[in-house]
Image (spheres, rainbow, N blue to C red):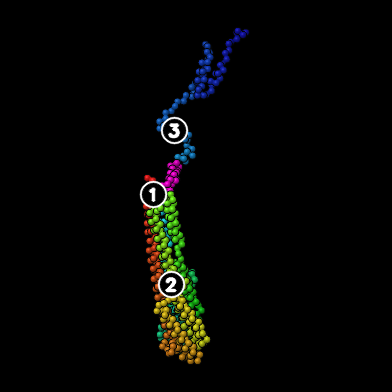
Amino acid sequence: MAADAPAVRKRPRRTRFTQRRTPIGSELGSASSATEPRTSGDPVWVLPAMYPPPTASKDDRDPDERVDDLELGGGATTFSTILGERLAPALEYPKRTMSFLLTSPGRLTLAAVVLIVAILAAGLSMSDSTNNRQQQLATVSSASEPQANAAQNLYSALTIADAAANTSFSRGGLGSAPQLRQRYDDAIAQATLAGTRAAAGITEVDSESMRNIATVQRLIPVYTGLVESARANARQGHPVGVAYLAEASGLMRSEILPAAAALYGDTSRSVAEDRAKLTGLPWVPLSGLLAAVLLLLFVQWRLTRRNGRLINLGLAAATALMVVALVAVSLATTLSWRGSASFGGPYSPVQTLTEARITAQQARSSETLALVRRQPGEVSAFEEAAGTIGDLIEESGATGEGAENAAEALREWRRGHADMRARLDRGDYAGAVEAATVEGAQPHSSADAFEDLDAALQTAIADARLDLRAEIEDARQASAALSAAVVLLSILATICVVVGFRYRLLEYL
């Protein structure tokens, strides 16, 4: 049975792996065939060559590029690789710069750049400050000061008109003296013109100054209407004319003059505020110049310790130029904006003399109104007003001919007023009116004395105003010259710094 059974030959054990699809499958098949001898009739197991053996591709790149590719990871295109390729050239310059600044030439270059920037910044800051002061001075000269002068002219014209109306009525009717009527009309016209000029300098429509001007302009026609009513009744011999004149004078004193006084106060404060801005030292620009000088001294000290050389001529010249600029600015500011009492003091002669003139006009209006009402008790305030006028003239510090004439006219007015009071107390009303209102009355005339006082005060105010405007113009021109000088000195100082460091840097070449 065993002999008849067909012979069954088992497959070689290694041939079980010949069906795996590997690149070396063919070699496995060939190896198994080689290990066992083949006999006749044995089946041949051959694997198809599904995966050909790899062949090396030809690389035509430069050897350095192949090495860089191997170092970067075999042509990787990750985000970090791309970012590194983009930023590597840009980061190279800061690295080189930092490396250079750590060297001695780099430190010298950095010190030179810092000094140049500090000097130019200080010089330009001072130039800008002086330019601003120059513009403020021009504003004071062209706007603030003329507006204040127009406001005081408005107040003076109103008081002159009221005094002229009272004087004319006390002498027997508003139409009895043509020269007084002409003075009244001129004063009203001057008040209207002064109000228009004062309003032209106001930029804010809703300001208090504009409301005061509107009040004056609105009530002046009401006042003139009451005066005309008093004049008409006086011509017809009606006693009610006194009541109309008293009402007109009351309107002037209670509403018109307070509004004009408030306007003058606002404009005077505006001039004082502008003056206060110009009287102070420019501390911020001065501190910049001082810092530049100290920085120059510090750098020279460091160079002396490092190099053993006592003086760097370029840096020494730059330091001298900045010191000159610092001293020039300090002296110009002190002398131009603080040295003059008429411009740097708390009260200028213009303002003080203007207050003296306003007080005198108020006293004159009260004096004539007391005559109209025949109330001698009201003239007792004259002495107090006269004392105030004398104090203001003395405080103004004015030494010209106008101030001297004003003081003499005030003394004469006091004598004329005393004569008027004596006659009024005796019941001599006609004599009192003559002493108070008639020019050339003997022994003393209040009218002549007041006219002389008002004219002298106007002359003193005009002289003080001319001095003030001249000082403003001088300060403006000084500011312009100082601005140009500081810029020029700063540029020269930077050139000296460059020259001073150039020779030190050439030593490293």
Mark 1 → mark 3, Cα distance in angstroms: 45 Å
Q: Secondary structure at mark 2?
A: helix
Mark 2 → mark 3, Cα distance in angstroms: 88 Å
User: As shown in the figure, which amino acid type bears the numbered disc 2?
Assistant: Ser
Q: Is residue 39 above or below residue 433?
A: above
Between 88 and 246, the one nearer to me in the picture: 88
Q: Secondary structure at mark 1?
A: helix
Mark 1 or 2, closer to the camera = 1
The residue carrying pointer 2 sits among few (fewer than 14), some (14 to 19) or many (20 or more) residues within 10 Å by Cα, namely many
Which residue was labeled with disc 1? 504
Between 161 and 489, the one nearer to me in the picture: 489
For marks 1 and 2, the one nearer the N-term is 2
Part of the protein shown in magenta: 86-107
- Tell whether 266 sits left or right of 509: right
Residue 499: image location, x then y, percent: 37, 52
For marks 2 and 3, the one nearer the N-term is 3
User: As shown in the figure, which amino acid type bears the numbered disc 1?
Assistant: Arg
Q: Residue at x 43, y 32 (%)?
A: 66
